[in-house]
Amino acid sequence: MKVSDDVDLLLGVMPLYIQKFIGEKDKHHSLIEIVIDLGRPPETRYVDHMEELSGQNVTRDEIDYVVKQVGKFTEDNRAGIERTLHRISAIRNRFGVIIGLTCRVGRAIYGTVEILRDVIESGTSILLLGRPGVGKTTLLRESARVLADELGKRVVIVDTSNEIGGDGDIPHPGVGRARRMQVPFPTSQHAIMIEAVENHMPEVIVIDEIGTETEAIAARTIAERGVQLIATAHGNTLENLLQNPTLSDLVGGIQAVTLSDEEARRRRTRKTVLERKAPSTFQVLVEIQDKDRLAVHHNVADVVDAILRDIPLSTEIRVRNENGAIDVQKPRKQIIPKVRIENKVLKPGNLRRKVRRIFTYGVSRSRLEGVIQKLGVSIQVVADLSKADLILTLKSKEKRQSKALRQARAEGLPFHVLRSNTVAQIEDFLVTLFYPEERSESKDRIIEEAEKAIFEVFERKQPVELPPCNAYMRRLQHQLASHHGLTTASRGREPYRCVVIYPIERHEGP
């Protein structure tokens, strides 16, 4: 592997006695960082040890000297040296004066991507986890270069702290032909992520350190638009990520679900269980255990399901040996039981034109008639089973059918089973039956409008009113906003009724 570190440029901004001390050691290749704290001896930290320059305490003038040699410090107290990957981080006192510096060596290591090349080239979205200093950013940088230079893809780097592309307006050569969008403030990273997609038509977006809820929402929005994501997040393992309520949505999120007695017996578990809430934003998750050893989870959704159901899994392990060759230890094949989804006998495409009369068994007739009137569909609720085209029943009633119902099923009369006797369930059934095209075409647009409104609410801390839509689509908007901890209300009268999303109210003191 080829290494480009520009250590001389970092030493060039140090006081002369520090330059001399490090130069005498001749260990540039293993130098990790230089620590300068006011009133203390400077420290040099290497891969396997730390050394102190004894007898020489750092003065305020020496700190000021270094600060003047480097770039401007941003809101996150980080600066750099133009066209290098070095990072200088400041410690300030209560009055904002810099009293300490951590000067970290940045290295572009060409060839590190080989251990994960097949996954990166597959086009799937990849999330990298690992402790600080293990090589996440180096792998991100190499991934961007390979995808842009060798595969000719349109790659955009969202560079919050200039660690991927280096300091200054011209990106470091380590990113190849990938384009770099700098982030002026850490709090606006999510907005730059969305801007990258909307303005620059990338095929791949590379992001370092997804750490907030808005950034997780932005990542999901990007993935849903078909753009490959390669990103890092806080946490060492997938289990760590699942325990983080802010970032667990990156791998589908977790929700508590109450099972029926029958399902609980089938799974041999308690009635209230944890399940994955949504599809995972990332298809592949990589745990970087050290710079030459990775654990790769290829189907994140299945792995999360297995973890939540306490099913032991083996993981693919990749190791780079001393000769540079990659050894891959494949996981043993395992069958992960799928979470059963309600099997609806109803086939919308086949029955939509045939169903005109519905017989209810356990379902509220008044609620059904109310939803029929609201949606304006041509359906009649009948009391005579022999005149029905479809039987609408509940899961709890399905097994306790009368003799007439069993006979109707034996004769081939279609059934549709609702999970609960609610207006929302009934409405979902009728929309699926009569408006499948509208539901399919409008859902993506409705979700996109709601996600943009959620961003705006988080940023402006002001309510946002969404465009009018039907009751089914409004319910999707309510659910999405609630998922992100926001409150909503419906306003207006049909057909102009719409959803308003409100910011989180914060209360100071008791």
Image (tube, rainbow, N blue to C red):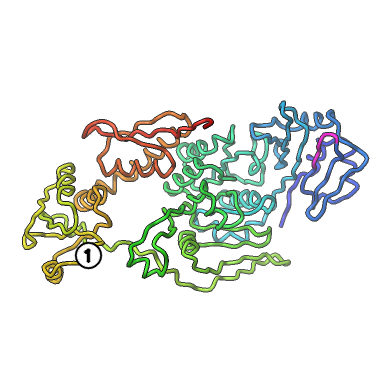
Residue 38 magenta-highlighted: yes
Identify the residue position indicated by label 1 in the image. Answer: 398
Horizontal side of 375 relative to 54 (left or right) equals: left
Does 432 sit above or below residue 487?
A: below
Span colored in magenta = 35-39
Main SS, magenta region, reads strand
Query: Number of callouts in the render?
Result: 1
Q: Nearer the viewer, residue 153 or 411?
A: 411
Does 168 sit above or below residue 475?
A: above
Could you tell me the amino acid type at mark 1?
Answer: Glu
- Residue at image x 42%, y 60%? 273
**Residue 440: image x %, image y %?**
29, 49
- Residue at image x 25%, y 57%? 418
**Residue 312: image x %, image y %?**
52, 69
Circle 1 sits in a helix, a strand or a loop, which is it? helix
Tell which residue pokes out farthest to the right in this image.
55
**Residue 475: image x %, image y %?**
30, 43
Residue 61 magenta-highlighted: no
Q: Nearer the viewer, residue 209 or 41?
A: 41
Q: Nearer the viewer, residue 445 or 270?
A: 270
Residue 155: image quadrant is top right
Horizontal side of 203 relative to 181 (left or right) equals: left
The answer to whether one can see residue 153 in this image is no
Horizontal side of 50 relative to 112 (left or right) equals: right
Residue 337: image quadrant is bottom left
Tell which residue pokes out farthest to the front in this image.
510
Residue 274: image quadrant is bottom left
The answer to whether one can see residue 319 in this image is yes
**Residue 214: image x %, image y %?**
49, 40
Does 264 sit above or below residue 205?
A: below
